[in-house]
Image: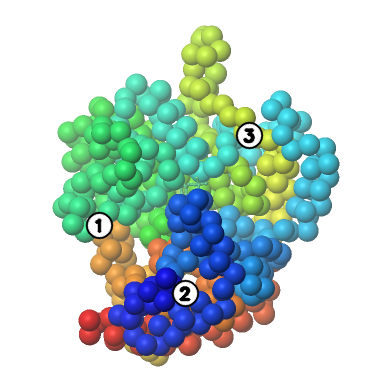
Amino acid sequence: MFEAYLVDWEDFGPEVVSEVRKYLERTPRSREIFENVSEYIPLGVNSNQRFYSPYPIYFREAKGSRIWDVDGNEYIDFNMGYGALITGHAHPKLVEAWREQVSKGILYTYPFELLEELSDLIPELFDIDMFRFSNSGSEAIMYACRLARAYTGRDVIIKIEGSYHGTYDYVLVSSWPTRGLAGPRRMPVSVLDSLGLPENTEDLVRVVPYNDVEPLIELLEEEGDEIAGLVVEPIMMNAGIIYPEKGYLERLRELTREYDIVLIFDEVKTGMRAFPGTAAQMFGVEPDLITLAKAIGGGATISLIGGDEDIMSLIAPSEAPRYQGVIHAGTYNANPFALTSVYVTLTEILTKDEYPRIIKLNEEIKKSYEEAFDKYGVDAYVELFGVSGAIMYSKEKIRNFRQVLNSRLELWYPLYFRMLNNGVIPNATGPEEMWTLSVQHSEEDVENYIENIDKAVKLMSISDQYLREE
Ligand SMILES: Cc1ncc(COP(=O)(O)O)c(C=O)c1O
């Protein structure tokens, strides 16, 4: 069965076919598990993003910068939980705190005492008045949208084309629309990302391009009084990495104020990425609400919705009985295991002194990629934000999602297989994904990555020739 998958790779040329063959040879146990579980678990994974052809690798253990698969192969991990693990795997300080907490119970479903310390820490760290914890980025976004609707009494959410905000129905629109469906560049069509979304989702979620306020202004002139919230990643980090142009975020702030729309910064990826804080703080633009997840938890399932008291306090309006505010609830919310993780991560591990060393190492990766792109004539560059980075498969600087769609994303595959076969997971799974360095990555780990870049980029360039001839 799996030999048939090799055909998929023939367009990339014989060198890539031989890399994929090598992948098959070194991961027989992963293949066996995939065959066994995919009969019961669709695609053999529990998050669609984890699947790739011919089958994903199954893992059993991770520590520091390393992760081991079920065939005993060791990898230096630069995926780091899609950026959730700036702490690295199983950080000793977390392991110690977890051990202690596990022995005292991990789920109380009563308020946990650590909330007091966290209430001292979090508002100041992230410049927010009030906050609540949930379990995932998707949940946090769902609550942020609900709060925005409750606050404004309106229904429609605006999002950015090409931005991913998790699996909540009313943001699962135009996260990665195909060219044929996406509509005009300046006025994108709302394309549903999934089957099973309510029919009215298209009307309740409007889409605008990133880095361009004119289409937004036109939309607001027509429908401004129906819009509850504008959700935006201050730096787009799910289509490679795309920075806001000068003044863009400030204009979003002005326009949302003008139309009384709740401005939501989704900081699930940007938060804690370059220093202990948010991109909102870095750019000096104050959203009404922020969502955080991933890096704040050191690997635990946790997210946070926070922001202005006026909006957050709708969860518990003083004049209403208990169940007439905005409902925010959950059996696993703010459980002792997750809160312990957040507290240790924020106070003992991701402190501001930890960042400069890793950011410097990250710059070396960029330099090395760009030297190799030059040497082999590959049209690509690298964008960094803090401890993360992404390859942009284009010669010209990318400023919005349409340009990402027109870039040569398929060149990621040769790079990925070549690196995996040499013991490096170069980034999270997918050409649109980033890599992340953790506080546990050493200089040697990064040297190892860099040593593999030349050959991987060479393979990209060979594949590029084959693909262009196709
Ligand atoms: C910007 C952004 N928002 C929200 C989410 C959803 O987070 P989760 O996967 O924890 O539900 C993601 C996930 O990658 C994300 O990148």
Residue 195 coordinates in the image, percent (x, y) = 31, 43
> What is the distance, in whole Å, between disc 3 and disc 2 at their CAs?
36 Å
**Which comes before the other along the chain, label 1 or label 3?**
1
Looking at the rendered structure, the kind of residue marked 3 is Tyr
- The answer to whether mark 3 and mark 2 are in CB contact below 8 A is no
Q: Does mark 2 have its CB less than 8 Å from ligand 1?
A: no
**Which comes before the other along the chain, label 3 or label 2?**
3
Query: Foreground residue, 147 or 13?
Result: 13
**Which comes before the other along the chain, label 2 or label 1?**
1
Q: Secondary structure at mark 3?
A: loop
Residue 224 coordinates in the image, percent (x, y) = 24, 31
Which residue is label 3 attached to?
332
**Count of residue discs:** 3
Image quarter hosting the C terminus: bottom left
Which residue is label 1 attached to?
178
> What is the distance, in whole Å, between disc 2 and disc 1 at their CAs?
23 Å
Residue drawn at the location 47% of the way across and 66% of the way down: 55
Q: Is residue 151 left or right of residue 339?
A: left
Query: Foreground residue, 67 or 130?
Result: 67
For residue 416, which numbered disc appears in the image?
Answer: 2
Image quarter hosting the N terminus: bottom left
- The answer to whether mark 1 and mark 3 are in CB contact below 8 A is no
Query: Foreground residue, 274 or 414?
Result: 414
Q: Is residue 90 above or below residue 458?
A: above
Using the rendered view, name the quadrant where residue 185 is placed.
Answer: bottom left
Looking at the rendered structure, the kind of residue marked 1 is Thr
Q: Secondary structure at mark 2?
A: helix
Q: Secondary structure at mark 1?
A: loop
Q: Is residue 292 left or right of residue 444?
A: left
- Whether residue 375 is visible: yes
Using the rendered view, name the quadrant where residue 222 is placed.
Answer: top left
Q: Does mark 1 have its CB less than 8 Å from ligand 1?
A: no
